[in-house]
Amino acid sequence: MTGKEFLKQIRDINITIIALQREIENINTLLTNTTIRPKEVDVQTSIKPDPMADKIIQKVEYEDKLVSFFNEQLKLKTIALTLIDKLDKQEDKSILMLRYINCMTFKEIMDAMDYSQSGVNKRLREAEKAFNALYVSI
């Protein structure tokens, strides 16, 4: 695995965490906005599965996955931050932090660092190369 692939892994986990958080929010909304209507009991029909129970189970499973992803992300970010801190150039540190630790888009980085898109691309490539040199040495 290269240094860039390692950093991309952190970013991918963050995207997964955000997606899981949204799903949990959607389930919470569904669970809190549902009204239960009383129904007549018909002894002749079979009992249908409770969709609310299924959603609660799904929510618990997502929350467990979320904790697992948070733990993995923490471990990877700790390694990444240690290596980023060892870089010589402050610009390299900043752009890697913005892109991979804070998961900012190119547009957000352009605005934050006052660079053009080609400037961000160039700086990011240089920073990834410097990071990779440190990463392959561990």
Image: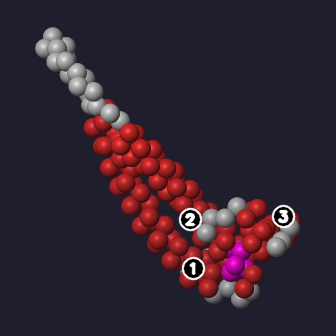
Q: Residues within 10 Å of mark 3 (few under 14, many from 20)?
A: some
**Looking at this rendering, what residue extends furthest in the top direction?**
44
Mark closer to the chain start, 1 or 3: 1
Q: Nearer the viewer, residue 111 or 128?
A: 111
Q: Residue at x 68, y 85 (%)?
A: 87
Q: Which residue is mark 1?
A: 81
User: CA separation, marks 1 and 3?
Assistant: 25 Å
Q: Residue at x 16, y 18 (%)?
A: 41
* Mark 1 or mark 3, whichever is nearer to me: 3
Label 1 with label 3: CB-CB less than 8 Å: no
Residue 101 appears anywhere in the view: yes
User: CA separation, marks 2 and 1?
Assistant: 11 Å
Asked if residue 99 lies left or right of residue 39, the reply is right
Region rendered in magenta: 92-96
Q: Residue 32: horizontal and vertical position, in percent?
A: 35, 43
Mark closer to the chain start, 2 or 1: 2
Q: Which residue is mark 2?
A: 10
Q: Amino acid type of disc 3?
A: Gln
Asked if residue 37 lies left or right of residue 62, the reply is left
Q: Residues within 10 Å of mark 2 (few under 14, many from 20)?
A: many
Q: Tell me: residue 70, above or below residue 128.
A: above
- Badge 3 marks a residue whose secondary structure is helix
Q: Residue 17: horizontal and vertical position, in percent?
A: 49, 57
Q: Residue at x 36, y 47 (%)?
A: 59
Label 2 with label 1: CB-CB less than 8 Å: no
Q: Amino acid type of disc 1?
A: Leu
Q: Which residue is mark 3?
A: 117
Q: Tell me: residue 58, above or below residue 42.
A: below
Mark closer to the chain start, 2 or 3: 2
- Badge 1 marks a residue whose secondary structure is helix
